[in-house]
Image (cartoon, helix red, strand yellow):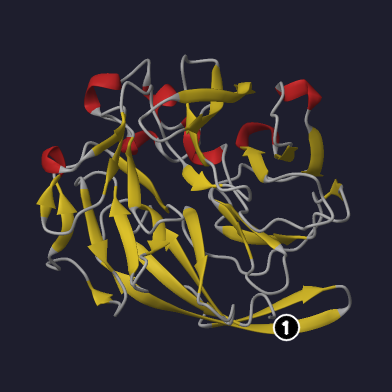
Protein backbone atom coordinates (compact mmCIF):
# COMPACT_ATOMS: atom_id res chain seq x y z
CA UNK A 1 0.00 0.00 0.00
CA UNK A 2 1.19 3.51 -0.77
CA UNK A 3 1.69 5.42 2.49
CA UNK A 4 -0.65 8.37 2.80
CA UNK A 5 2.04 10.40 4.58
CA UNK A 6 5.62 10.32 3.32
CA UNK A 7 8.61 11.88 5.04
CA UNK A 8 11.02 13.13 2.39
CA UNK A 9 14.55 14.13 3.39
CA UNK A 10 16.46 16.72 1.37
CA UNK A 11 19.14 19.31 2.14
CA UNK A 12 19.09 18.45 5.83
CA UNK A 13 15.34 18.98 6.18
CA UNK A 14 12.41 16.60 6.61
CA UNK A 15 9.25 17.39 4.69
CA UNK A 16 5.87 15.71 5.16
CA UNK A 17 4.08 14.89 1.92
CA UNK A 18 0.43 13.81 1.84
CA UNK A 19 -0.70 11.46 -0.93
CA UNK A 20 -4.14 10.04 -1.67
CA UNK A 21 -6.04 8.69 -4.68
CA UNK A 22 -8.00 11.49 -6.34
CA UNK A 23 -9.56 9.61 -9.28
CA UNK A 24 -9.42 5.93 -10.20
CA UNK A 25 -10.58 3.22 -12.63
CA UNK A 26 -9.08 4.98 -15.64
CA UNK A 27 -7.52 3.11 -18.57
CA UNK A 28 -3.89 4.02 -19.27
CA UNK A 29 -4.13 7.70 -18.34
CA UNK A 30 -1.00 9.27 -19.83
CA UNK A 31 -1.75 12.99 -19.87
CA UNK A 32 -3.86 15.63 -18.12
CA UNK A 33 -4.65 19.23 -19.02
CA UNK A 34 -6.76 22.05 -17.61
CA UNK A 35 -9.51 23.14 -20.00
CA UNK A 36 -10.08 26.86 -20.64
CA UNK A 37 -13.03 26.79 -18.23
CA UNK A 38 -10.99 25.21 -15.43
CA UNK A 39 -11.79 21.50 -15.70
CA UNK A 40 -9.16 18.77 -15.45
CA UNK A 41 -9.27 16.58 -18.56
CA UNK A 42 -7.44 13.25 -18.76
CA UNK A 43 -6.81 11.01 -21.77
CA UNK A 44 -7.28 7.24 -21.75
CA UNK A 45 -4.76 6.03 -24.29
CA UNK A 46 -6.16 2.53 -24.81
CA UNK A 47 -9.89 3.36 -24.91
CA UNK A 48 -9.57 6.43 -27.15
CA UNK A 49 -11.43 8.63 -24.67
CA UNK A 50 -10.98 11.95 -22.91
CA UNK A 51 -12.69 12.18 -19.51
CA UNK A 52 -13.44 15.01 -17.08
CA UNK A 53 -11.61 14.25 -13.82
CA UNK A 54 -12.30 17.57 -12.09
CA UNK A 55 -14.40 16.09 -9.28
CA UNK A 56 -12.31 12.94 -8.94
CA UNK A 57 -13.75 9.66 -7.67
CA UNK A 58 -14.56 6.48 -9.58
CA UNK A 59 -14.39 7.29 -13.31
CA UNK A 60 -15.06 3.77 -14.62
CA UNK A 61 -18.49 4.72 -15.97
CA UNK A 62 -17.96 8.45 -16.30
CA UNK A 63 -19.19 9.81 -19.65
CA UNK A 64 -16.47 10.73 -22.12
CA UNK A 65 -15.86 14.32 -23.15
CA UNK A 66 -14.67 12.85 -26.46
CA UNK A 67 -14.44 9.23 -27.58
CA UNK A 68 -13.33 7.30 -30.64
CA UNK A 69 -9.82 8.79 -30.81
CA UNK A 70 -6.88 6.77 -32.12
CA UNK A 71 -4.39 6.68 -29.26
CA UNK A 72 -5.02 10.08 -27.62
CA UNK A 73 -1.77 11.12 -25.97
CA UNK A 74 -1.37 14.78 -25.04
CA UNK A 75 -3.47 17.94 -24.92
CA UNK A 76 -2.72 21.65 -25.13
CA UNK A 77 -4.67 24.91 -25.09
CA UNK A 78 -3.96 27.48 -27.81
CA UNK A 79 -3.74 31.19 -26.92
CA UNK A 80 -7.19 31.72 -28.48
CA UNK A 81 -8.76 29.09 -26.18
CA UNK A 82 -9.04 26.16 -28.58
CA UNK A 83 -8.02 22.85 -27.03
CA UNK A 84 -6.10 20.26 -29.03
CA UNK A 85 -5.25 16.57 -28.64
CA UNK A 86 -2.71 14.39 -30.43
CA UNK A 87 -3.67 11.00 -31.87
CA UNK A 88 -0.52 8.92 -31.50
CA UNK A 89 -1.77 6.02 -33.62
CA UNK A 90 -3.80 8.17 -36.01
CA UNK A 91 -1.02 10.62 -36.91
CA UNK A 92 -3.14 13.74 -36.32
CA UNK A 93 -3.77 16.71 -34.06
CA UNK A 94 -7.49 17.34 -33.53
CA UNK A 95 -9.47 20.15 -31.97
CA UNK A 96 -11.51 18.98 -28.98
CA UNK A 97 -15.27 19.49 -29.11
CA UNK A 98 -17.25 17.97 -26.28
CA UNK A 99 -19.72 15.23 -27.00
CA UNK A 100 -18.20 14.40 -30.38
CA UNK A 101 -16.76 11.22 -31.78
CA UNK A 102 -13.09 11.41 -32.67
CA UNK A 103 -13.71 11.12 -36.39
CA UNK A 104 -15.96 14.20 -36.27
CA UNK A 105 -13.42 16.48 -34.60
CA UNK A 106 -11.74 19.10 -36.79
CA UNK A 107 -8.20 18.15 -37.85
CA UNK A 108 -5.75 20.87 -36.88
CA UNK A 109 -2.80 19.06 -38.52
CA UNK A 110 -2.54 15.68 -40.23
CA UNK A 111 -0.01 13.38 -41.85
CA UNK A 112 2.19 13.39 -38.76
CA UNK A 113 4.20 10.33 -37.77
CA UNK A 114 3.52 9.18 -34.21
CA UNK A 115 2.79 12.64 -32.72
CA UNK A 116 2.98 12.43 -28.95
CA UNK A 117 3.46 15.46 -26.72
CA UNK A 118 2.05 18.83 -27.68
CA UNK A 119 2.42 22.22 -26.03
CA UNK A 120 2.50 25.96 -26.58
CA UNK A 121 5.98 27.36 -25.98
CA UNK A 122 6.91 30.66 -24.34
CA UNK A 123 6.67 32.59 -27.62
CA UNK A 124 3.21 31.23 -28.43
CA UNK A 125 4.09 28.55 -30.97
CA UNK A 126 2.46 25.13 -31.02
CA UNK A 127 5.15 22.48 -30.69
CA UNK A 128 4.79 18.71 -31.01
CA UNK A 129 7.08 15.73 -30.66
CA UNK A 130 6.86 13.21 -33.51
CA UNK A 131 8.95 10.16 -34.41
CA UNK A 132 9.69 9.98 -38.15
CA UNK A 133 11.58 6.69 -37.72
CA UNK A 134 12.59 4.12 -35.11
CA UNK A 135 15.90 5.81 -34.27
CA UNK A 136 15.03 9.46 -33.76
CA UNK A 137 12.33 11.93 -32.83
CA UNK A 138 11.81 15.51 -33.92
CA UNK A 139 10.39 18.61 -32.28
CA UNK A 140 8.10 20.29 -34.79
CA UNK A 141 6.38 23.67 -34.87
CA UNK A 142 2.82 23.46 -36.24
CA UNK A 143 1.48 26.65 -37.77
CA UNK A 144 -2.18 27.49 -38.38
CA UNK A 145 -3.38 25.49 -41.36
CA UNK A 146 -1.07 22.59 -40.62
CA UNK A 147 2.19 24.01 -41.98
CA UNK A 148 5.10 22.18 -40.30
CA UNK A 149 8.55 23.51 -39.39
CA UNK A 150 11.29 21.37 -37.83
CA UNK A 151 12.78 22.84 -34.65
CA UNK A 152 14.97 19.92 -33.50
CA UNK A 153 15.37 17.15 -36.10
CA UNK A 154 17.35 14.44 -34.33
CA UNK A 155 16.50 13.62 -30.72
CA UNK A 156 17.65 10.05 -30.02
CA UNK A 157 14.92 7.56 -29.22
CA UNK A 158 14.93 4.48 -27.01
CA UNK A 159 12.55 1.90 -25.61
CA UNK A 160 10.32 3.20 -22.84
CA UNK A 161 10.33 0.61 -20.04
CA UNK A 162 6.87 -0.31 -18.81
CA UNK A 163 4.91 1.13 -21.73
CA UNK A 164 4.86 -1.99 -23.91
CA UNK A 165 1.13 -2.57 -23.49
CA UNK A 166 0.25 0.95 -24.63
CA UNK A 167 1.28 0.22 -28.22
CA UNK A 168 -1.31 -1.04 -30.74
CA UNK A 169 -1.26 -4.83 -31.27
CA UNK A 170 -0.24 -4.46 -34.90
CA UNK A 171 3.09 -3.00 -33.74
CA UNK A 172 4.04 -6.12 -31.77
CA UNK A 173 6.51 -7.70 -31.27
CA UNK A 174 9.25 -5.89 -33.16
CA UNK A 175 8.00 -2.31 -33.48
CA UNK A 176 6.35 -1.56 -30.15
CA UNK A 177 9.23 0.58 -28.93
CA UNK A 178 8.75 3.00 -31.80
CA UNK A 179 5.22 3.67 -30.59
CA UNK A 180 5.97 4.35 -26.94
CA UNK A 181 9.37 6.04 -26.99
CA UNK A 182 7.73 9.45 -26.89
CA UNK A 183 6.56 8.81 -23.33
CA UNK A 184 9.95 9.69 -21.95
CA UNK A 185 11.39 12.22 -24.31
CA UNK A 186 9.38 15.38 -24.02
CA UNK A 187 8.50 18.01 -21.54
CA UNK A 188 7.71 21.65 -21.92
CA UNK A 189 7.73 24.69 -19.70
CA UNK A 190 5.75 27.55 -21.28
CA UNK A 191 6.94 29.92 -18.52
CA UNK A 192 10.59 28.94 -18.32
CA UNK A 193 12.93 31.11 -16.29
CA UNK A 194 13.12 34.54 -17.98
CA UNK A 195 16.88 34.69 -17.44
CA UNK A 196 17.38 31.61 -19.61
CA UNK A 197 17.13 32.12 -23.40
CA UNK A 198 14.94 29.09 -24.07
CA UNK A 199 11.22 29.20 -24.86
CA UNK A 200 11.13 25.42 -24.61
CA UNK A 201 12.66 22.62 -22.54
CA UNK A 202 12.87 19.06 -23.89
CA UNK A 203 13.68 15.89 -21.97
CA UNK A 204 15.49 12.97 -23.59
CA UNK A 205 14.19 10.07 -21.55
CA UNK A 206 16.66 7.35 -22.42
CA UNK A 207 19.62 9.64 -21.69
CA UNK A 208 18.26 11.28 -18.54
CA UNK A 209 18.71 14.82 -19.88
CA UNK A 210 16.74 18.05 -19.97
CA UNK A 211 17.81 20.34 -22.81
CA UNK A 212 17.15 24.01 -23.48
CA UNK A 213 15.84 24.72 -26.99
CA UNK A 214 16.47 28.24 -28.36
CA UNK A 215 13.80 29.96 -30.43
CA UNK A 216 15.61 29.13 -33.68
CA UNK A 217 16.01 25.47 -32.69
CA UNK A 218 19.07 23.39 -33.45
CA UNK A 219 20.44 19.88 -33.64
CA UNK A 220 20.56 17.62 -30.59
CA UNK A 221 24.33 17.90 -30.13
CA UNK A 222 24.14 21.71 -30.15
CA UNK A 223 21.54 22.11 -27.40
CA UNK A 224 22.51 23.19 -23.88
CA UNK A 225 22.15 20.60 -21.10
CA UNK A 226 20.08 22.08 -18.26
CA UNK A 227 19.86 18.89 -16.18
CA UNK A 228 21.48 15.45 -16.34
CA UNK A 229 21.62 12.28 -14.26
CA UNK A 230 17.87 11.69 -14.39
CA UNK A 231 16.15 8.35 -14.70
CA UNK A 232 13.89 7.62 -17.66
CA UNK A 233 11.77 10.76 -17.82
CA UNK A 234 8.06 11.11 -18.46
CA UNK A 235 6.04 14.31 -18.37
CA UNK A 236 7.35 17.54 -16.88
CA UNK A 237 5.97 20.96 -16.07
CA UNK A 238 7.07 24.07 -14.17
CA UNK A 239 5.56 24.86 -10.81
CA UNK A 240 3.30 27.90 -11.35
CA UNK A 241 4.88 30.09 -8.66
CA UNK A 242 8.41 28.98 -7.76
CA UNK A 243 9.59 27.92 -11.24
CA UNK A 244 10.96 24.51 -10.21
CA UNK A 245 10.66 22.05 -13.08
CA UNK A 246 8.85 18.91 -11.87
CA UNK A 247 9.71 15.76 -13.82
CA UNK A 248 8.17 12.30 -13.56
CA UNK A 249 10.33 9.18 -13.41
CA UNK A 250 7.87 6.47 -14.53
CA UNK A 251 10.06 3.40 -13.97
CA UNK A 252 10.95 4.62 -10.48
CA UNK A 253 7.46 5.88 -9.60
CA UNK A 254 8.90 9.20 -8.49
CA UNK A 255 8.76 12.94 -9.15
CA UNK A 256 11.85 15.18 -9.07
CA UNK A 257 11.91 18.98 -8.72
CA UNK A 258 14.74 20.67 -10.64
CA UNK A 259 16.12 24.19 -10.51
CA UNK A 260 17.28 24.81 -14.08
CA UNK A 261 19.15 27.94 -13.03
CA UNK A 262 21.78 25.55 -11.65
CA UNK A 263 22.68 23.16 -14.52
CA UNK A 264 24.06 20.01 -12.89
CA UNK A 265 23.83 16.26 -12.44
CA UNK A 266 20.77 15.20 -10.39
CA UNK A 267 21.64 11.51 -10.04
CA UNK A 268 21.67 11.59 -6.24
CA UNK A 269 18.78 14.02 -5.73
CA UNK A 270 15.95 12.62 -3.58
CA UNK A 271 12.45 12.70 -5.10
CA UNK A 272 9.75 15.00 -3.77
CA UNK A 273 7.26 12.09 -3.80
CA UNK A 274 7.66 8.37 -4.48
CA UNK A 275 5.59 5.20 -4.87
CA UNK A 276 3.37 6.33 -7.79
CA UNK A 277 3.33 3.41 -10.26
CA UNK A 278 4.39 4.54 -13.77
CA UNK A 279 3.88 8.23 -12.99
CA UNK A 280 3.47 9.83 -16.41
CA UNK A 281 2.04 13.35 -16.12
CA UNK A 282 1.90 16.21 -13.60
CA UNK A 283 -0.44 19.16 -13.28
CA UNK A 284 -0.81 21.74 -10.48
CA UNK A 285 -3.75 23.71 -9.23
CA UNK A 286 -3.66 27.44 -9.91
CA UNK A 287 -1.87 28.32 -6.66
CA UNK A 288 0.61 25.47 -6.92
CA UNK A 289 -0.43 23.96 -3.60
CA UNK A 290 -1.79 20.67 -4.99
CA UNK A 291 -0.02 18.39 -7.43
CA UNK A 292 -1.97 15.88 -9.54
CA UNK A 293 -0.01 12.92 -10.90
CA UNK A 294 -1.50 10.23 -13.12
CA UNK A 295 -0.31 6.63 -12.87
CA UNK A 296 -0.73 5.03 -16.27
CA UNK A 297 -0.11 1.51 -14.91
CA UNK A 298 -2.95 1.37 -12.37
CA UNK A 299 -5.36 4.00 -13.73
CA UNK A 300 -5.13 6.38 -10.79
CA UNK A 301 -4.71 10.15 -10.53
CA UNK A 302 -2.96 10.95 -7.25
CA UNK A 303 -3.48 14.12 -5.23
CA UNK A 304 -0.21 15.20 -3.62
CA UNK A 305 0.10 17.98 -1.02
CA UNK A 306 3.32 19.43 0.37
CA UNK A 307 5.71 18.00 -2.21
CA UNK A 308 6.70 21.33 -3.79
CA UNK A 309 6.24 24.49 -1.78
CA UNK A 310 4.61 27.48 -3.49
Position in image of residue 224 (x %, y %)? 82, 35
Residue visible at 20% across and 45% down in the picture: 48
Whether residue 67 can be seen here: yes
Q: Left or right? Give the position of 119 relative to 22.
A: right
Say if 172 sits above or below 256 in the image.
Answer: above
Q: Is the residue 216 above or below the residue 20 in the image?
A: above
Q: Nearer the viewer, residue 16 or 200?
A: 200
Q: Is residue 277 left or right of residue 111?
A: right
| Secondary element type, mark 1 | strand
Q: x, y (%) of residue 269?
A: 79, 59
Quadrant for the C terminus in the image: bottom right
Residue 157 visible? The answer is no
Where residue 194 appears, as percent x and y from the top left, is: 78, 57
The residue closer to the viewer here, 78 or 289, is 78
Identify whether 157 is placed above or below 251.
Answer: above
Q: Position of residue 171 (x, y in %)?
A: 29, 20
Badge 1 is on which residue? 15
Residue at figure coordinates x 81%, y 51% from the top left:
266
Location of residue 163 with respect to 135 vertically, above or below: below
Location of residue 39 (image quadrant): bottom left
Q: Residues within 10 Å of mark 1 (few under 14, many from 20)?
A: some
Amino acid sequence: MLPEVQEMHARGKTQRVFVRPFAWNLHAPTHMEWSPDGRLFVVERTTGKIKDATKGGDLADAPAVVEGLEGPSSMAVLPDGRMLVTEFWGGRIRQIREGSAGRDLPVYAGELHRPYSIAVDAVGRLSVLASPDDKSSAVLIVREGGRIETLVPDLPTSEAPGFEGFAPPWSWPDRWHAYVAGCGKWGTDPKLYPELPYPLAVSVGGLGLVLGVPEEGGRFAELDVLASGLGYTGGMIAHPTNGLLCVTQPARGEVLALDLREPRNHHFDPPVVRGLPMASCIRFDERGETMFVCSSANGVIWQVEGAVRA
